C-alpha cells in the first residue's frame, strides 16, 4: 500500500515541478514556484506575486519527497528554492511571524535531510520568535510586527521550530501552554484562531488544529510530560468529530486556504508516526490520525482531474476538481492574506495542499498504518 501512495505522491510532485517550478529571473542555481497554472506573464516572472509562505511549503514538500525517494536532482531543487527565497525576499525576515515560522521549519528540515547548514538564517529567525514573545500584552507572539493579534498560525509553527532547533524547548513549552490556556474552545476542544485586544477571534480553521497537533506531539516526544500527549488525544478526537465530515478533512478554498488541509494532514501524519506511548488513548490517537489522513487522501485522489496524465487537486477533497484556465481574477494579497483565484485549482497553494496530503499518506502507510486500521 505504501508503494501506491509513493507513486501518487511522486505524481503530485512531478505535476508541480513541470507546471510551476522555474528559475527566479533566469538566475542559475535558483528555483521558485510560480503561484498559478496556467500563469500570467507577471506571475511567471515573479514580478509582484510570489507569496512567501507558499514557497516555504514548496520547500517543505520537496523535503518530504527527498525523504520518500532521495534523488540528486531534488537536492539541487531544494538548495535552489532556499537561495531563490533569500534573493526574492531579500533575506529571510519579513513582517509576518507566521510566514517566517513556516520558512524556518522548512529550512531546518532541509538541513537535517541534506546535511547542509544555514545557521545564520535559522539563528536570525530564532531571534525573531524569541524576541517577539510578549505575555504582558496577552501573547504569545503576534501574527505580524506592530500588531496585537496573537494567533495559533504564528505560535504553532514557531513553537514546533523552537522545539526542534537551538535549545529553545522551554519557550516551545510556554507557547503550547499559552495556546492551551487561551485558544481552546471548551465546547468542541478545537483551537480558536487567536486573540486580539483581549477578545477571542473565534474562527476555527483546520490548519490551526494541525499546527497545535504538531507542537504538542513534538513536546510529547521531547519532554515526556503527560499533558502534551493528553492534549493530542483531545485534539485528534475533536478534529475527527468536527472537521472531517465523512472522514475527509474540510477544505479551505483557494488562496492561502489551499494550504490549510495539507498542513493539517502533515501534522496528523506526525501524530500517527511519532506520538509516543502504548496505552489505549495513545493508540487511538495514532490510529484516528492515520485514518483521517488516508481517507482524505483517497478522496482527494478519487476526485482529482488530470492534465497530461498528471493530477490536479481540488480545494475541497470531497468533490470533483475543476480544470484550471487562465481566466478570471488571480489570487492576490489583501491585508496580509491571499484571496483565491476565480478558479481556485489554478493556485499553487491548492496543488501544494494536495501534494502535502499525498506525502502524508505515504508517510503513514510506510510506518505500517493502513486504511483498515
Image: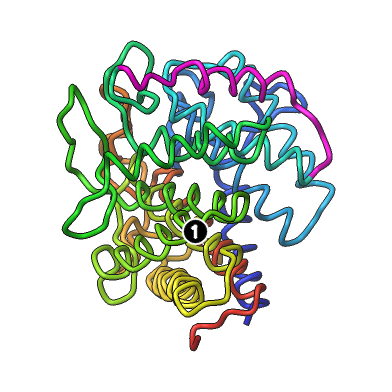
Residue count near mark 1 (Cα–Cα under 10 Å), binned few <14, some 14–19, many ≥20: few
- Name which residue lies at 62% across and 66% down: 363
Residue 132 magenta: yes
Q: Does residue 132 lie above or below 217 as drawn?
A: above
| Residue at the spot 66% in from the left edge and 29% down from the top edge | 23
In reply to whether residue 201 is colored magenta, the answer given is no
Q: Position of residue 351 (x, y in %)?
A: 46, 52
What span is in magenta? 114-136
Percent across and percent down for residue 143 are 35, 25
Left or right: residue 274 compared with residue 262: right
| Front position in the image: 130 or 76 | 130
Which residue, given by chain and number where applicable, does mark 1 sit on?
A: 226
How would you classify the magenta stretch by its main secondary structure? helix
Count of numbered circles on the image: 1
Q: Quadrant of residue 288?
A: bottom left
Q: Is residue 135 above or below residue 254?
A: above
User: From the viewer's perspective, is 192 left or right of 267?
Assistant: left
Q: In which quadrant is the N terminus drawn?
A: bottom right
Decide which of 262, 185 is in the foreground and name it. Answer: 185
245 over 351 or under it: above or below:
below
Q: Is residue 102 left or right of residue 318?
A: right
Which of the colour schemes (rainbow, by chain, secondary structure, one colour) is used? Answer: rainbow
Q: Nearer the viewer, residue 369 or 55?
A: 369
Rendered location of residue 223, percent (x, y): 60, 49
Residue sitting farthest toward the top: 146
Q: Picture coordinates of residue 4 (x, y %)?
A: 62, 78
Q: Residue drawn at (30%, 57%), measured in percent from left and top?
A: 251
SS for tag 1? helix
Residue drawn at the location 18% of the way across and 26% of the way down:
198
Q: Quadrant of residue 165?
A: top right
| In the rendered image, the vertical position of residue 306 relative to residue 60, given as above or below | below
Amino acid at each position: 500500500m505504501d508503494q501506491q501512495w509513493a507513486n501518487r505522491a511522486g505524481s503530485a510532485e512531478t505535476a508541480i515541478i513541470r507546471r510551476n517550478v522555474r528559475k527566479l529571473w533566469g538566475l542559475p542555481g535558483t528555483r521558485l514556484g510560480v503561484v498559478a497554472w496556467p500563469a500570467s506573464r507577471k506571475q511567471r516572472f515573479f514580478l509582484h506575486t510570489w507569496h512567501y509562505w507558499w514557497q516555504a511549503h514548496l520547500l517543505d514538500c520537496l523535503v518530504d519527497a527527498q525523504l520518500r525517494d532521495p534523488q540528486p536532482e531534488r537536492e539541487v531543487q531544494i538548495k535552489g528554492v532556499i537561495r531563490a527565497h533569500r534573493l526574492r525576499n531579500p533575506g529571510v525576515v519579513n513582517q509576518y511571524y507566521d510566514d517566517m515560522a513556516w520558512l524556518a521549519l522548512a529550512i531546518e528540515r532541509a538541513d537535517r535531510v541534506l546535511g547542509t547548514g544555514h545557521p545564520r538564517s535559522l539563528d536570525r529567525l530564532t531571534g525573531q520568535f524569541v524576541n517577539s514573545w510578549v505575555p504582558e500584552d496577552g501573547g504569545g507572539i503576534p501574527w505580524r510586527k506592530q500588531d496585537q493579534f496573537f494567533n495559533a498560525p504564528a505560535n504553532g509553527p514557531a513553537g514546533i521550530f523552537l522545539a526542534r532547533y537551538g535549545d529553545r524547548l522551554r519557550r516551545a513549552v510556554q507557547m503550547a501552554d499559552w495556546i492551551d490556556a487561551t485558544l481552546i474552545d471548551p465546547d468542541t476542544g478545537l483551537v480558536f484562531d487567536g486573540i486580539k485586544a483581549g477578545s477571542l477571534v473565534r474562527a476555527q480553521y483546520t490548519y490551526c488544529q494541525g499546527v497545535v497537533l504538531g507542537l504538542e506531539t513534538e513536546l510529547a516526544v521531547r519532554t515526556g510530560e503527560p499533558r502534551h500527549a493528553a492534549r493530542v488525544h483531545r485534539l485528534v478526537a475533536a478534529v475527527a468529530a468536527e472537521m472531517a465530515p465523512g472522514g475527509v478533512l474540510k477544505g479551505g478554498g483557494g488562496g492561502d486556504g489551499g494550504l490549510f488541509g495539507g498542513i493539517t494532514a502533515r501534522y496528523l501524519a506526525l501524530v500517527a508516526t511519532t506520538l509516543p506511548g502504548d496505552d489505549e488513548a495513545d493508540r487511538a490517537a495514532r490510529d484516528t490520525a492515520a485514518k483521517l489522513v488516508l481517507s482524505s487522501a483517497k478522496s482527494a485522489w478519487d476526485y482529482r482531474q488530470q492534465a497530461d496524465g498528471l493530477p490536479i487537486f481540488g480545494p475541497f477533497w470531497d468533490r470533483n476538481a475543476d480544470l484550471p484556465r487562465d481566466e478570471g481574477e488571480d489570487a492576490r494579497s489583501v491585508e496580509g492574506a491571499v484571496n483565491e483565484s476565480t478558479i481556485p485549482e489554478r493556485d499553487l497553494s491548492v496543488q501544494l495542499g494536495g501534494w502535502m496530503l499525498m506525502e502524508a499518506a505515504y508517510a503513514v502507510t510506510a510506518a505500517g498504518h493502513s486504511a483498515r486500521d
